[in-house]
Image: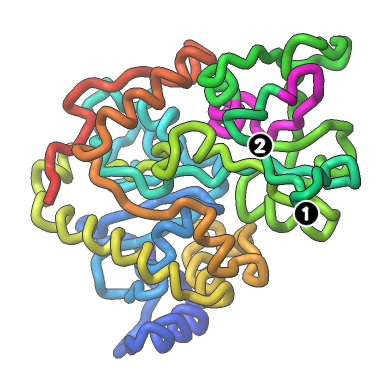
Amino acid sequence: MKKTKRWLCLAIGLSMVAGLSFTSCKKDDIPAEEITVYMPDGAPALALAGLMSQDTLGDGVTYRVVNAAQIAATTTNADREKNADLCVMPINAAAKLHGESGEYTMLGAVTHGNLYMIEVLTANDVVPPEPIFEGYTAENLSTLIGKKVGVLQINNVPGLTFKAVLNKHGIPWQEMTSAGSVAVDKVNLVALTDASAVTSVSAKCFVIAEPAATAQAKNNFSIVGDLQSLYGGENGYPQAVLLAKTELVESKSAWLKEFAVKVQESAVWLASASGNEVVAAVNAHMADADMTTSLKAPLLTADVLGRCGVRFAYAGDIKDEATAFLEDLITVNAQATKLPTEAFFWAYTP
């Protein structure tokens, strides 16, 4: 559904930024042919912010940004007509819910990792002649053995990925409980309730996502580790993926091919967009008109946006990479996801 009257002024302002104009505006229900695109707030919404910045009432597409906890429900309604036509969600949830169902097809990945390690650097971290601590690498990650590491969403992608990184480098770990003790021969993982908990939890370092990682600079934290690099080098891993109803893949193949190109262009737009433009685009498409995005304009600098891993990669091109990542997550937790069928991956590549 296009935004209602309370949002029309903002929508019109966005159209002017994009060089567009409205000829008429009215409050309508979603037409039967309207294509709905749902995405969770945060980094996944960044991937489609460029498209949302150019959204118009008559383009046949409705974008809705929801709380991350609600995204799975947008594809699992018993009334399939009410489900999203396209949806962005974490790859583990996408594969677990729809990897075998046949109801949705993965078009591609829209983000490739935005997870970083942060800590407060002290004089002990300065190792002459280097002026500052260089950060965690494959060579020194084992120095975390015997120490505590705070992890955001320890049972979801952030925690699963960090555990997979430790497994890749042969580093033992354990999840700590309130009654547990620190193991001297393992990395001790402590669950964080949210990113702000880094100031109240005692740990050597913390694993959280951008832009929240940069936001903690106000509390003297520095980024000291890049999980994307630690996991798989420059390409990171497919973190958030774009799904489409399989019936849409079959009936609107040409339209989806054009839409995929626009998603690629949206990432290009993001590279030069201002924080205010990004936040305005997302706020104009919140599913709940009483909510605003968690994204903060002052934080969305070019450097921070660059660390959010936003780029589109076709499913057919990254099928092996995606499968390997899912296998790593299953090794961490067999219930975290499933290996999808071949048909789950969109066969099209340009």
Name the N-terminal-most of marks 1 and 2. Answer: 1
The crowd level at tag 1 (other Cα within 10 Å; few <14, some 14-19, many 20+) is few
Q: Give how far across and how far down residue 100 sits, in percent.
A: 27, 21
Per the rendered image, the range of residues in magenta is 143-162
Q: Is residue 191 left or right of residue 53?
A: right
Q: Quadrant of the N terminus?
A: bottom left
State yes or no: residue 133 in magenta.
no
Query: Which is nearer the eye, 329 or 42?
Result: 329
Tell me what residue is drawn at x 86 percent, y 16 percent. Answer: 178
Where, by quadrant of the figure, is residue 19 drawn? bottom left
Left or right of 243, for residue 174: right
Q: Secondary structure at mark 1?
A: loop
Is residue 258 shown above or below 8?
A: above
Please give the name of the residue rendered at 74% of the width and 37% of the height, measured from the top-left corner: 206
* Residue at the image point whose x is 17% and y is 53% from the top: 256
Question: In the image shown, does 308 or 279 lie closer to the viewer?
Answer: 308
Q: Select label 1 or label 2 by which is in front.
A: 1
Which of the 4 quarters of the picture holds residue 294? bottom right
Q: Is residue 314 above or below residue 323?
A: below
Residue 205: give x, y in percent of width and height.
Answer: 77, 36
Of 159 and 246, nearer the camera is: 159
The residue pinned by badge 1 equals 131
Contact between labelled residues 2 and 1, with CB atoms less than 8 Å apart: no
> Real-space Cα distance between discs 1 and 2?
16 Å
Assess disc 2: are there few (<14), some (14-19) or many (≥20) residues with their C-alpha within 10 Å of its C-alpha.
some
In the rendered image, which residue does mark 2 sit on? 136
- What residue occupies the far front of the structure in this picture? 129
Residue type at numbered disc 2: Tyr
